[in-house]
Every structure is written in structure tokens, then in C-alpha cells.
Amino acid sequence: MADHPNDYIKPELMACCGAREIRDNDVVIVGTGFPAMSANIARHTHAPGARLMQESGVYDAQPARPALSVGDPCLNPGAAMIGGLVEVMGMFLQGGWVDVGFLAGSQVDKFGNINTTAIGDYNAPKSRLPGSGGANPIGALAKRTLIIALHNTRTLTERVDFITTPGYIDGPGAREKWGLPAGSGPQVMITNKAVLRFDTNTREAYLESYHPDTSVDEVVKLTPWKLNVADDVHETEPPRADEIRALREVLDPHRMIRIYEKRGYV
Amino acid sequence: MGKVMTTAEAVQQFVSDGDFLFIGGYICRPPFAAIHEIIRQKKRDLTITRSNAADDFDMLIGSGCVKRFISTFISLGLYGLARCYRRSIEKGIPHRIEIEEYTNLSLPLMLMAGALGMPFVPVKDMVGTDLMKVKAFMGENKYRMIDSPFDGSPVMLAPALKPDLAIIHVQQADEEGNAQMWGIGGDCRWGANAAKRVIVSCERIVSRDTVGKDPSRTIVPSFKVVAVTEEPYGSHPGYTPGFYDVDLSYGNMYKEASNTVEGFQAFLDEWVFGVKNREEYIQHYIQRFGYAQFKRLGAKFDYGYPVSYAY
């Protein structure tokens, strides 16, 4: 049984949950924050052959500090290859080479659709958000997508106001109908309360595991759709010692991950 | 006829009201010297585009220069939502711009199509989402769906984009405009080559011989270029690889300033209208924040192994 230090914070647990979804030799497209940390934890533990790229054009960067954006200057020196969007989003992602992509959003629904465009009516929005950027193509074309979300009834919703990025769209068969790659789609939704997985028949997110300080009841209550619970629902495995070591000693010695606590990931 | 000129001359000569501009950059290399000059010269009714827009686009929108924006994304990065952009869309201040929404796959491919002289390009994203439902000034020409003539599968076709003008900032160029860039590219190469003409802003003008020492780095050939402007620190507060880092504290200052209309106006008065050109801007920066902070932005030199093209 692996050793589990008990002084972790919730964003560290979430980063580890993300890491466990990555397999050795996966090609992973990452942004900043959780995705980069998850992918790098995986590289330092069970998936040393995983390789990362940023949509801005960078492959296998060796950043000397945590990147603050996908265009961060620290991604340049030491990278194995630098091109641009046509290379990474076109040749690699649309070309079918990307195994894993990470997504996050202001609104996420039960089919794993994500809204980063506008809250409220598109033509008279309550809040105008940045737009798709690389999210739509990653959600459409990566073989597996991992969704990071805040677990509350504002972020999670039965149906997003605007589908910027496709999850399973309106349910079974929709991705196939639109010609998206066979077998692609959201694999898991990692929140600050739980890990939700997507039912292969209904395409709805269901509860796979709840984090150590919460319960099935609390997670169900915080989820605005009728959340199905796995027969073998269990507590999420806390961060293992090797995962925490990779995170704190190698990847994030200044523990910048703490900013996610301020953003509500507690 | 020489192409080397000041940014003010280049903007005056080659940017017209109503033009469609590609503006290169991706946190790295936004052509800020030209952005500020466009604002100073009060250009109006522009259509602007690039993938992943940031503070430079936000400033143009807040300054009232923009009518239309072919967008994939706009934010202040670390500092969150783009304030002027939000005010434009949510409150119509200074006016509501029109937006056509694409993605960081489709838009670069549309620019690529423009550069390659193709009328349109098939794209595999966007389908099935609400990005299909929202159409603005491009109307039905935002995209078309067809059944592939080869296998019958549904395919989205997106139109080629051919901007009137591209403005890019690169590390170095020669006097004829052969422009050399390295580091994160974004959609700069394709956007520049899609445009009918190009203004090249650069950190330094070098000789044609220097360009010839590493010609693989040239992203735009001289015959497309109408103006070359030498603007050291020309993409500040963004960065240029090998020259200087992102200026995070300035980014924070812009975020705070642009929180309100008055703050944004004060920012323009100080940093755009209060200076004549980039040189004065840099001098003002040094006076305001000190030479030490200015020097801290400078990159350490770490030259690679020199390449040889000999035979």
C-alpha cells in the first residue's frame, strides 16, 4: 500500500487525479496550472514516456519555472520543437496524434459540454467570456479529454448556456453524427469534491469517487442534475507520497498551486 | 524607394480606416509600437484578427479603433477577462463591436488557406457546438457544411482569410523586409503571408548577409513587405524571445487601469497619447519605474550552437 501523506491541499489531490488518467507514452496537450502539473506528475511517476505540447506551438518544453500561459517565454529554451498553431493544432491535434487534452470552463454540463463564451443570452450576455481559443478543437479531436471543474451548482449545470467545446453534445451518438473521431470524448471530470466518469451508454457524468472530506450525499447535493452513483463508489485515493514528492520537490517548489485554493478549489 | 521608416510613417501610409488587419503575436511579439501608433492616429472601423488575442486587441477595442473582430479568444492571460472587450460587448462602451467566432484550429487554417491561395479549407472542429449557430458579419459565409465528395462524411468548410495588411513584430529583419522570427509562433507566419502586404516591426535591422547566415528563420519574404520599422522593446509588455521577458507588473497595472473607463483613458493619456513614439515610451517607463526594473526585463544571452549551411 502506497504511503499517503495527509498534509495535501485539494488542488494537489485534483492534480494527482489528473495524473492518474495519463498513460505512459501519451501525447498530451496542456495549458497551464492543473493540466501541466498533472501531466508532469505522471511523467515523474508512472508515465515517464508521456510527452507534452502547448497549442502555441511548443513540443516537449523544459521550463525552468512554472509557465503562466501557453505562450510563456520559459517554454522556448530547451523545447524539442517549436512551431505554431498550424503545427500543434493542425498537424498534431487534427492530424490525430494527441491522446489527452485538458479542459476547464465557467460552465460544464452533464454531457461534459463546456461554455467559455458567454453566460446568459449570447446576444446580450450577463458576462462575456474569452471564447474558445484551443478548447473547442481539443474537445473535438483529442482522443480523451479530462475536465477540471469547480463543484457547485453555478459551474455545473444540466445544460450549458452556450456549447463552446463539445463533450457528448446532446447525448449518445451525437459525436459520431458530427464525424468526430471514433471513441473520442470526455473521459473524466475532476472537481474539488469528486471524480465523475461518463457512462458509456447514456454519456452522462456519474459519480465514481468522492474526495476524502466529503460524501456521496454532499456530492449529489452539489450536482444540479440527477447524479447517478457507481455501484462501487468509493473514496478518492489521496495523493501518494511519490506524487506529492514530484509535485513539491520538482515541479512546484514554490507551491504556486495554492492559488487554486483562492479560486475556490477547496 | 526605401522600406525602412518610422512606425508613425508606416501606419500613416499603410493603415486606412476600414482596413482588415492581421496583427501577429501570442504573448510573444505583439507589435505594440504599431498598436499604440494606430491608437494615436485614431484609425477607425478596423476589422482585426489573430488567434488568442490579448491586451493589444483590448486596447484597440477600448480606444474605439475597431468595428469588427474575427476572434478565437481574448483575455489578459494571468489577469483574467479583457476589460475593454467586455465593456464593448456588455455595455456598448465605446461602442459594441461585431464578433465572428472561430477557434485556434479553424482560424489559423483559414489564414493558411489565404496564404496558399485556396478559397476555403476543411476544418474538423466546431461541428456540433453553438459556434455553428452564431453568425455575425460573415453571415452564411462563416462556414458551409458539405458531405465529403470522397467518403460522404460531414465536413465543415471555412473561408480563406486575406487581410489587407499584416503587422508583425519579429526579432530581426533586413532593410528589404526579409523577416526572421524564432520561438513560439502562434499564427504569425500564416497570418503575415495571407495578407496583401506586411509591415515588419523588428528588434533590430540586420544586413542581408546576416539574414543569409540562417535563412530558415525567415518567415516573410521581402516582396510581401511594404515597411520595416526598427523598434527595440517593440512588443513590451509582451516579450520577444532572446530579447526580453513578459512584464507582469505592467500587465497588472493595465488590468487595474482598464477596470474602469476613466482608468483606461488615463492609461492611454499616459502611455499612448503622452508619448510621441516608442523611444519616448521606453524613456517614460525608465523614469516611472527606474532603470533597474527596465534592465530586469532584458534576456540573458544563451546562444545556441551555430548552424552551418555550407556544402
Image (cartoon, helix red, strand yellow):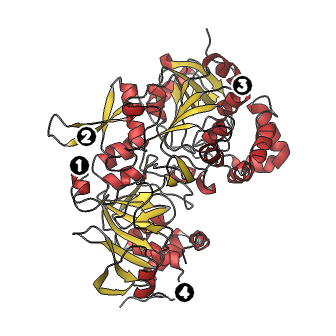
Q: Compare residues B207 and B133 and report the one nearer the observer.
A: B133
- In this image, A54 relative to B116: left or right? right
Q: Compare residues A193 and B232 and report the one nearer the observer.
A: A193
- In this image, B19 relative to A186: left or right? right
Q: 10 Å neighbourhood of mark 1: few (<14), some, or many (≥20)?
A: some
In three-dimensional space, the C-alpha distance between marks 2 and 3, rounded to whole angstroms, equals 43 Å
Q: Position of residue A202 (x, y in %)?
A: 25, 69
Q: 10 Å neighbourhood of mark 2: few (<14), some, or many (≥20)?
A: many
Q: Are marks 4 and 2 on the same chain?
A: no
The answer to which of marks 2 and 3 sits earlier in the sequence is 3
In three-dimensional space, the C-alpha distance between marks 1 and 2, rounded to whole angstroms, equals 8 Å
Q: Chain of mark 1?
A: A
Label 4 SS: loop
Q: Which quadrant would residue B39 be assigned to in this image? A: top right
Q: What is the number of the mark on residue A179?
A: 1
Q: Are marks 2 and 3 on the same chain?
A: yes
Q: Which residue is mark 3?
A: B41
Q: Which residue is mark 2?
A: B155
Cβ–Cβ under 8 Å for marks 1 and 2: yes
Q: Chain of mark 4?
A: A
Q: Chain of mark 2?
A: B
Cβ–Cβ under 8 Å for marks 4 and 3: no
Q: Which residue is mark 4?
A: A7
The answer to which of marks 1 and 4 sits earlier in the sequence is 4
